[in-house]
Amino acid sequence: MKLSSIRLASAALAVTAALAASTAGAQSLRYAHVGSEGDIQHWFAAETATRIPEATGGDVTVTVFPNSQLGGVQETIDGVRSGSITMAHHEFASLAQLVEDIAVFNAPFIYRDGEHALKATDPRTSPVLQAFNEQLIENGNMRVIGRLFRGARQMTAKMPVYSPADLEGQPFRGVPLQLWTTMIKGFGAIPTPVEVSELPTALMTGMVVGQENPLTMINANKLYEVQSHVMLTGHMQNVLPVFINEDAWQSISEENREKVLDALDELAYETLATAQQAEQDLVGELTEKGMTFITAEDGLKLDEFRAGVVAQVNEDFPTWAPYIEQIAAIE
C-alpha cells in the first residue's frame, strides 16, 4: 500500500473513531499550553492525552494544542474561562487576574522541596488550593484539577556567592514581574529586568552579574559560557497548575472525574521524579563544562537568603501571610 493510501486510511479510521466516540457520548477536551514540544510541559500534556482515555475507557478524550497554537497566556485563560478551550496549564501567577492571591503558590522559599510543592497544590487534599478553587469557580468558571513540576530554580553568578552580602549593590537579572523584583531585593541585589532572549548578552557584558533559573534552562541556553558559579538555593519550586472549564468538568461523570484526578496526580509525581533526576545529571554535566557548584555544605547561607526574601515578600505582599502559614503546615 502506498504511503498516501496509508495516510488516507489512517485519517478515515481517525474520523470513524471520533464519530464513534461522539455517538457514545464521550467528552472531548481541548488542552492548550504555551510550552514547546520539547519541554516537559508538552510531555505531561501528551501523556494526559493518552492516560485519561485509558483511565475512563474512552469516555473522556483529550486533544493537545502546544506551543501557543490556540493563543498566548491571556488567550488561553480567556478561552478556558469561556469554554472555547477546555483545559490548560500555566503559572499560578497567570490566574491572579481572577483570584489575586493565588500567585502565593509561586512565592520563593514557600516549599520545603518538590514533594511539599505537589502536596500543597493537590486539589483533593490541600485546604489552601481547595479554598482558591472555590474562588476560581466563582470568578473564572474554572478550577485547578492537577499540576506538573518543572524543577527548582537555582542562582548563578560570575563569582561565588555565599550570602546576600555578596550581592549587595550588584545588578541581578529578574523576570520583569513584581514577584521577581521582590525576590531579587530579598537576595540583597539590585533587580534588573532583562528579557530571556537578551540574558546571555547581559551576563557577558556585565549589565547583570547573575540570574536564576532551573538547571535545564541554564544548560540549554549555554549560560555556562558566561557564568562561573551555581548556587543551589532551590528558592523556587516551579509547579504549574492544570485548570479546566467548570462547565466541562461538571459534564464529566463523578466516577470519571475521580479517574481523571488519579491520572493527573500520577503524572505530577512522574514529572517530579524526572525533574529531580535531570537536576542530578546536570550537576555533573555543568561541572564538566566548567561551572562550580556551591551548596550549604560549602558555606552557602540559605537561611540568610530565605530570611531576606521572606521579609521582602511579607512587605510587598502582606495579604499572603495566612496562606503561607497554611502551606507551611501541610505535611
Image (tube, grey):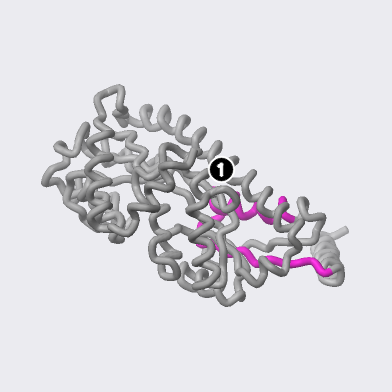
Q: Is residue 297 above or below residue 187?
A: above
Residue 306 percent coordinates (x, y): 28, 40
Decide whether residue 46 is among the magenta residues: yes
Residue 111 percent coordinates (x, y): 41, 42
Decide whether residue 41 is among the magenta residues: yes
Left or right position of 299 against 127: left
**Point 21% across, 55% down: residue:** 192
**Point 75% across, 67% down: residue:** 27
**Point 25% across, 56% down: residue:** 181
Left or right position of 284 against 174: right
**Residue under pointer 1:** 271
Residue 310 percent coordinates (x, y): 27, 46
The answer to which of 134 and 57 lies nearer the viewer is: 134
Left or right position of 10 against 276: right
Q: Is residue 14 above or below residue 127?
A: below
Q: Looking at numbered disc 1 in the image, what kind of residue is underneath it?
A: Thr
* Residue 254 visible to an observer of this rendering: yes
